[in-house]
Amino acid sequence: MTTPEPARRRRRPPQGDDEQPGTRPARKTSASKRRGVPGAAAAMRGAAEQLSELLGRRPESVSSLKPTDDGWEAVVEVVELERIPDTTSVMGSYRVELDEHGELISYERTRRYSRGMIDRLGG
């Protein structure tokens, strides 16, 4: 009969003098979160949902999103005319501007194309 091995203790990482055991240092928040500007994911959802409400059509995707001095600018792809096969459906690209609170302040259609169309480089 063998004797059981004693239980091993796990090592704890060294802690600073000012930290309490079991606590984590506070995360740094980005400047945009402190000012109340929505993050990228919230801005994408907001752009798609608000444009859908105005157009009465469901957005297909958000193809670009970038921060601006006053909020966000997104390009949202929308099916404007459904056709069979769906590669011939007519799509619209809309530039959407959101303010610092994520509210839609303007939009405009910048392009109209069939879904199956591929952009060519240099053309």
Image (cartoon, rainbow, N blue to C red):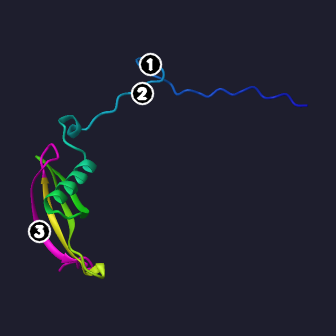
Point out the residue furthest to the front here: 56
Label total for image: 3
Residue 84 vs residue 22, the one in the foreground: 84
Q: Residue at x 22, y 60 (%)?
A: 64
Q: Which residue is mark 1?
A: 20
- Residue 106 position (above or below residue 57): above
Judge whether residue 59 is colored magenta: no
Residue type of the residue flagged with mark 2? Arg
The numbered mark, 1 or 3, whose residue comes first in the sequence reads: 1
Does residue 69 appear in this view?
no
Q: Which residue is mark 3?
A: 110
Magenta-drawn segment: 98-123
Q: Secondary structure at mark 2?
A: loop
Residue type of the residue flagged with mark 1? Gln
The circle drawn on residue 24 is 2
The numbered mark, 3 or 2, whose residue comes first in the sequence reads: 2
Number of residues whose C-alpha sits closer than 10 Å to that of mark 1, classed few (under 14), some (14–19) or many (20 or more)? few
Q: Gap in Å between the C-alphas at discs 2 and 1? A: 8 Å
Q: Residue at x 50, y 25 (%)?
A: 14
Does residue 104 appear in this view?
yes
Q: Gap in Å between the C-alphas at discs 3 and 2? A: 48 Å
